[in-house]
Image (tube, rainbow, N blue to C red):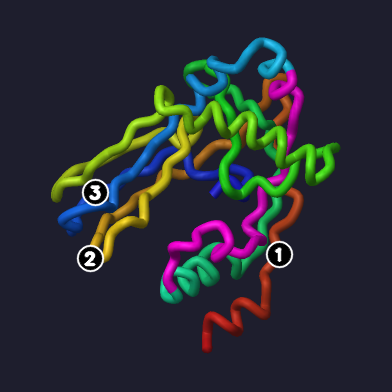
């Protein structure tokens, strides 16, 4: 939910019903991803800012999503449109570590064309998803996972066709601060009446 200025600080997930196969969750360490960057890419990333928004077509990002899931995400993620400018590199308020603040809600890099944005994001994101920067968790009933959203990305693998139920709690976040000390800026928060009407039908 990086489209919010102070997106959730942490999340807690508890496994209640787990399919016999599939349904794993992957986490990526965005601190080690930043640390893996060559020095010139670190310097580039340190100065970049990105516009994050929830105004996009969820179906194009998650082709495995069924109609019910698409409707849910339309109601939750699109009934209000958010746009926030975040630094590409945020400084962790407790550890002082630098991490890459990217993910699926990045629409563009400020001051760069769409083609440049796509190329640069691909370079940085490839460091995030390197196997040595990730862990894959195979859930069992009763498992509890807690993670710091300021230093991770996560992804639930949609490779199952049996019931899967996990309960989530999120903790309110703080406003990211970049390497230069500037804080993230909320640019837009606007209710989308058309989506609200569609969700009510």
- Report the magenta residues as a range: 44-66
Name the foreground residue: 160 vs 47.
Answer: 160
* 45 magenta-colored: yes
Visible residue check, residue 185: no
Tell me how far mark 1 sits from mark 3, CA to CA.
Answer: 32 Å
Indicate whether 28 appears above or below 138.
above
Which label is found at residue 182?
A: none
Within 10 Å of disc 1 (Cα), the crowding (few <14, some 14-19, many 20+) is: few
Residue shown at the point (64%, 26%) measured from the top left: 89
> Mark 2 highlights which residue?
163
CA separation, marks 2 and 3? 15 Å
Secondary structure state at the residue bearing disc 2: loop
Residue located beneath label 3 in the image: 14
Residue 187: in magenta span: no
- Checking the image for residue 190, the label placed there is 1
Q: CA distance from mark 1 to mark 2?
A: 35 Å
Q: Position of residue 101 (x, y in %)?
A: 59, 34
Q: In the displayed structure, does residue 57 sit left or right of residue 83?
A: left
For image coordinates 72% across by 45% down, the residue present is 51
**Mark in the foreground, 2 or 3:** 2
**Residue 167 position in % (x across, y down):** 28, 55
Tell me which numbered mark, 1 or 3, is placed earlier along the sequence. Answer: 3
């Amino acid at each position: 939910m990086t489209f919010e200025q102070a997106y959730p600080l942490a999340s807690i997930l508890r496994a209640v019903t787990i399919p016999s196969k599939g349904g794993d969750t992957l986490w990526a360490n965005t601190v080690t991803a930043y640390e893996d960057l060559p020095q010139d890419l670190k310097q580039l990333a340190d100065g970049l800012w990105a516009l994050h928004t929830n105004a996009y077509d969820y179906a194009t990002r998650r082709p495995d999503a069924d109609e019910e899931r698409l409707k849910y995400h339309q109601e939750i993620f699109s009934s209000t449109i958010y746009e926030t400018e975040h630094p590409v590199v945020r400084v962790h308020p407790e550890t002082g570590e630098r991490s890459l603040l990217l993910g699926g809600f990045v629409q563009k890099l400020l001051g760069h064309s769409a083609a440049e944005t796509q190329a640069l994001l691909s370079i940085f994101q490839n460091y995030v998803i390197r196997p040595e920067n990730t862990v894959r968790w195979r859930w069992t009933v009763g498992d509890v996972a807690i993670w710091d959203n300021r230093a991770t990305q996560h992804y639930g693998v949609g490779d199952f066709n049996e019931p899967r139920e996990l309960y989530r709690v999120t903790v309110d976040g703080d406003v990211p601060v970049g390497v230069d000390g500037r804080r993230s800026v909320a640019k837009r928060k606007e209710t989308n009446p058309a989506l609200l009407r569609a969700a009510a039908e």
